[in-house]
Image (cartoon, helix red, strand yellow):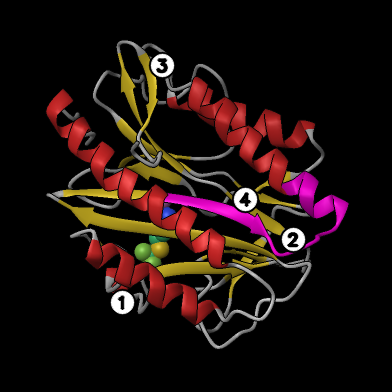
């Protein structure tokens, strides 16, 4: 069941998602060779609480951290640890908060110092696929239009889309209907209505789309060990077109 949001609710979700975007930007600033992913996690939680928000992921299905830190071949749900970030790594940062009754959720992938050309291309292709897919989130379009746009964009750049994890509706719950796959067929799926709020989150692999979950029960990695990138925005479908909620508020 899809829960439509009123304009007032969308304003609140702009605040929640704005907090997420601001914190992601601050965490990205801290990323440098020699930092430990656990330091980023601790800082993200502190920043959320300072802004009067609660980290959304901590305790969600037993997830023990506030931030997901996925390095190189890690796709999503990488767990912060004493791992040292090194020059040439790419690091995906996925963060969410709960504030004033509503969730915010967004992700970015950042380079650590100088990275390979292919890593740069992968990150750019993933960010571009997200930007293009957001433009498909228009009243009268369908979920399949968003999904197909991600897939076309990514595969056109020579990369592959992860099948096993998907985007989602978001609101009073972190995960609501509908699911937003990163692959699909135009014209198929649920019709988009004003008031839908969706987290669109392409997970893009350098090689094969196949992934597996590590024995820790969380960390998702590429089966071929090649790189993966992840960008996510929470957006609202409105009569005036898509509105990106996960932007830092002025
Ligand atoms: N952005 C991810 C999602 O939508 C983050 C969830 S991590 C979890 O699923 F720990 F909360 F599960
Ligand atoms: Co999400």
Residue 148 showing in the rendered view = no
Mark 3 residue CB less than 8 A from any atom of ligand 2: no
Q: Is residue 148 left or right of residue 177?
A: right
Residue 95's place in the image compared with 154, above or below, is below
Q: Which residue is mark 4?
A: 162
Q: Which span is picked out in magenta?
A: 106-122
Q: Position of residue 204 (x, y in %)?
A: 66, 49
Query: Residue 129 — which label?
Result: none
Q: Earlier in the sequence, mark 4 or mark 3?
A: 3
User: Residue 211 is drawn in which quadrant?
Assistant: bottom right
The residue at the far bottom in this view is: 82
Given residues 165 and 35, the one toward you in this image is 35
Which of the pair 110/133 is nearer the observer? 110
Question: Which of 191 and 107 lies nearest the eye of the viewer?
Answer: 107
Q: Which quarter of the figure has residue 52? A: bottom left
Mark 4–mark 3 Cα distance, whole angstroms, equals 24 Å
Mark 2, other Cα within 10 Å: few <14 / some 14–19 / many ≥20: many
Q: Position of residue 134 (x, y in %)?
A: 49, 27
- Of labels 2 and 4, earlier in sequence is 4
Q: Residue 62 bears which disc, if any?
A: 1
The span from disc 2 to disc 4 (Cα, nearest Å) is 12 Å
- Quote the CA–CA distance across marks 3 and 2: 32 Å
Task: Give the tally of numbered discs.
Answer: 4
Residue holding disc 2: 227
Q: Residue at x 65, y 70 (%)?
A: 32
Residue 7 horizontal/vertical position (percent): 17, 24
Lower sequence index among marks 1 and 3? 1
| In the image, residue 108 lies in the stretch drawn in magenta | yes
Say which residue label 3 marks: 138
């Amino acid at each position: 069941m899809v829960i439509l949001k009123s304009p007032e609710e969308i304003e609140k979700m702009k605040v929640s998602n704005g907090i997420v975007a601001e914190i992601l930007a601050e965490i990205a600033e801290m990323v440098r060779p020699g930092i430990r992913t656990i330091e980023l996690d601790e800082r993200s939680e502190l920043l959320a609480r300072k802004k009067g928000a609660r980290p959304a992921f901590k305790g969600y299905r037993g997830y023990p951290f506030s931030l997901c830190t996925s390095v190189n071949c890690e796709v999503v749900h990488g767990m912060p640890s004493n791992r040292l970030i090194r020059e040439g790594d790419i690091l995906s940062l996925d963060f969410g908060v709960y504030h004033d009754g509503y969730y915010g959720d967004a992700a970015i992938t950042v380079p650590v110092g100088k990275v390979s050309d292919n890593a740069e291309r992968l990150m750019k292709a993933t960010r571009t696929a997200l930007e293009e897919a957001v433009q498909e989130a228009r009243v009268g379009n369908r979920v399949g239009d968003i999904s197909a746009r991600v897939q076309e964009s990514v595969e056109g750049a020579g990369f592959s889309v992860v099948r096993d994890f998907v985007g989602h509706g978001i609101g009073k719950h972190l995960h609501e209907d509908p699911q937003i796959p990163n692959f699909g067929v135009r014209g198929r799926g649920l019709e988009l209505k004003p008031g839908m709020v969706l987290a669109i989150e392409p997970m893009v692999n350098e090689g094969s789309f196949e992934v597996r979950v590590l024995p820790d029960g969380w960390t998702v990695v590429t089966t071929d060990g090649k790189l993966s990138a992840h960008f996510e925005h929470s957006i609202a479908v409105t009569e005036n077109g898509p509105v990106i909620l996960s932007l830092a508020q002025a």
